[in-house]
């Protein structure tokens, strides 16, 4: 019903028949869902007659967005990344949004979010050559890397090097770095027993081990950043 509510708010008018076709359900199911939404207090208007349909009052929901804590953290970190990139377009209200999100956190959660933000580094824009070689990493890899980064848990990854050779590594994802539009994970590599940098879109597989690691300072990774030509 959540997707249905979003659609009804965005569209001018939707007929029950069209909604049923779009959601691959029966008209009876759509009619039942609409009634349930009304009973939950959603202001759904209906226009009768030829060409009529249903829609959700567009003023509904303004100021009522409820985010789960992980969603709020992701949004806050995304705002921080956008601000650090210093793009002037469409970012005028980001500061206000960030302050409202931060105000909704407890002091403990606020400290945790600030610590996460400090582990995300913004570097220079990637070269044209690098940008031409980007491939979107698998969704399950992104999810595993995301969770391991937040929870400070080691990962077992399958990694494809620039020369095409593949290897399995066990890494600690200490920092993430954006050389727009390419993301890198700044890690401690257990195979090499040393800091290493991995391009996120070259990670073929990723699985959390359950083993936690202690965060190392950025200075510990400066040599590998310099070696890979990554600038902070």
Image (spheres, rainbow, N blue to C red):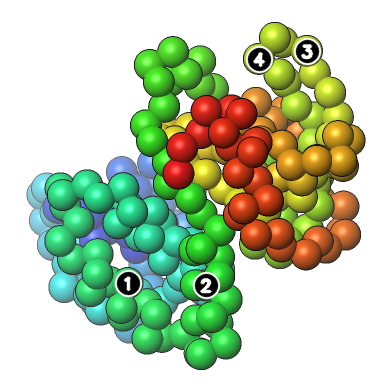
Where's residue 64, x and y in %?
31, 79
The spot of residue 232 in percent (x, y) is 45, 44
- Specify the quadrant of the image occupied by residue 205: top right
Give the structural element (helix, strand or loop) at label 2: helix
Residue receiving disc 4:
162
- Residue that carries the numbered disc 2 in the rendered image: 113
Q: Can residue 168 be seen in this view?
A: yes
| Mark carried by residue 156 | none
Mark found first going from the N terminus, 4 or 1: 1
Q: Residues within 10 Å of mark 3 (few under 14, many from 20)?
A: few
Q: Name the residue under label 1.
A: 98
CA neighbours of label 1 inside 10 A, class few (<14), some (14 to 19), many (20+): some
User: Would you say residue 46 is visible in this rendering?
Assistant: no
120 with respect to 151 (left or right): left
Cα–Cα span, label 2 and label 1: 12 Å
Q: Distance between the residues labelled 2 and 3?
A: 37 Å
Query: Gap between marks 3 and 4, in whole Å?
Result: 7 Å
Q: Please, which residue is most extreme toward the top here? A: 163
**Residue assigned mark 3:** 165
| Residue 85 vs residue 3, the one in the foreground | 85
The span from disc 4 to disc 1 (Cα, nearest Å) is 38 Å
Instruction: Locate residue 78: give its quadrant.
Output: bottom left
Q: Which of 119 and 36 is in front in this view?
A: 119
Q: Which residue is drawn at 71% across and 59% down?
A: 216
Camera-side residue: 40 or 231?
231
């Amino acid at each position: 019903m959540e997707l249905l509510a979003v659609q009804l708010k965005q569209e001018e008018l939707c007929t029950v028949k069209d909604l049923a076709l779009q959601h691959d359900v029966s008209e009876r199911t759509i009619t039942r869902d609409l009634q349930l939404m009304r009973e939950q207090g959603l202001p759904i208007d209906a226009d009768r007659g030829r060409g009529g349909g249903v829609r959700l009052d567009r003023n509904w929901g303004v100021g009522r967005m409820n985010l789960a804590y992980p969603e709020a953290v992701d949004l806050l970190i995304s705002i921080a990344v956008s601000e650090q990139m210093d793009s002037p377009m469409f970012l005028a209200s980001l500061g206000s949004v960030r302050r409202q999100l931060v105000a909704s956190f407890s002091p403990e959660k606020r400290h945790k979010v600030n610590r996460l933000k400090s582990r995300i580094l913004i570097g220079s824009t990637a070269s044209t050559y690098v940008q031409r070689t980007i491939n979107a990493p698998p969704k399950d890899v992104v999810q595993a890397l995301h969770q391991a980064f937040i929870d400070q848990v080691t990962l077992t990854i399958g990694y494809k090097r620039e020369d095409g050779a593949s290897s399995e590594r066990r890494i600690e994802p200490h920092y993430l770095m954006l050389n727009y539009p390419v993301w890198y994970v700044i890690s401690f590599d257990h195979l090499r027993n040393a800091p290493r940098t991995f391009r996120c879109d070259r990670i073929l597989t990723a699985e959390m081990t359950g083993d936690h690691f202690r965060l190392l300072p950025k200075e510990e990774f400066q040599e590998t950043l310099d070696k890979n030509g990554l600038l902070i």
